[in-house]
Amino acid sequence: MRKLTTSGINLILVCALFMPIGCTINTKDEGFAIYLTKDDIHPAQMEAMSHVKLADQPVVSMKDVITYNAQTHEIKLTASAFERIYGLDVPVRGKSFMVCVDKKPIYWGAFWTPISSISFDGVTIWIPLGFQEPNVITLELGYPSSTFYAGEDPRNNPEILNSLREAGKLINELSISDVNKLPHSVKGYELYSWSEDGTWRFTLITGTNRNKTLDEIVAGENVISESGWVNVRMTGLEATKEVLSKLPQEEFVIWIDVLREQTEQTDIKIQLPPGQTVNDIKEYTLQCGLDLHIEEP
């Protein structure tokens, strides 16, 4: 066993004597973490604070993070960390948190409960209403939607992304092969198809109450989420089947035959493919247990 030298003992004594001014505990290796505030400062008071003390321990540490998706800002957590978030007591006006790197605050936000009727112009993490698979939380902009957020997006801060990248936790985006199942959508999914350069192309997108634009359907950013928004384009029948196979059983899918209120000047026309392709997809969705409806004029 290696013995501690006199010089080593002296160094320890110096650190013990002067720790308040020089030999503080090294937090350089902590990396990305999310902390509650030490005094449970209300979100409405955070902007006015010149200094905010962090809680003693993070509510989410780097070891709790399985992956961080830089595109969607979804954080896949260990089961114990997800249970910790689920168990937080969050009032309807939110509970403040700080996103940090090595205990240095980068930006702040608030945990929010989805049952709240109070809007919030800030970064939020919505508390899950129940246990779910996968164990994912998301850093969202605004509550109840991003239209309530007016500031700059702080989530792509280089220090945060570099910390996650160095820890091997950062992914830039998901591909369809990366997920076992796409998330359930309360309003189902919308399927669009069109012919381009002699090839049939398809888009599956999360259902909403609003009409989609042609650009959003045929040229928007591909987004594959494990808990939220999905917008994925496919080329050909087999690729479309692969994506449809990732939908939960009994998921509602509406195949839209014509795009209403199209304003873009283009040769692309949303329409159904030939009958055989339509029948192939109808049969496949039946095998997958999906609730497919075709909207025809």
Image (cartoon, grey):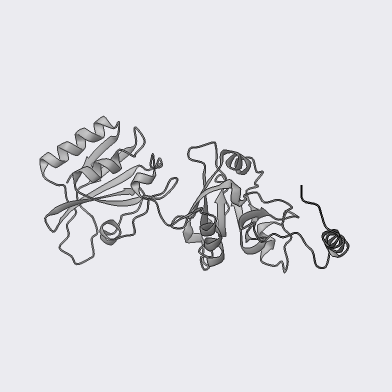
What is the x, y in percent for residue 62? 60, 51
Residue at image point 74% right, 52% down: 56
What is the x, y in percent for residue 139? 53, 54
Residue at image point 19% right, 54% down: 270
What is the x, y in percent for residue 161? 52, 61
> Which residue occupies the foreground of this view, 110 or 38?
38
Asked whether residue 112 is in view, the answer is: no
What is the x, y in percent for residue 165? 51, 58
For residue 172, which quarter of the picture? Answer: bottom left
Q: Is residue 160 left or right of residue 58?
A: left
Residue at image point 79% right, 64% down: 23
Asked whether residue 262 is in view, the answer is: yes
Q: Is residue 215 left or right of residue 22?
A: left
Q: Is residue 165 left or right of residue 187?
A: right
238 versus 44 height, above or below: above
> Which residue occupies the foreground of this view, 166 or 227?
166
Q: Is residue 171 left or right of residue 239?
A: right
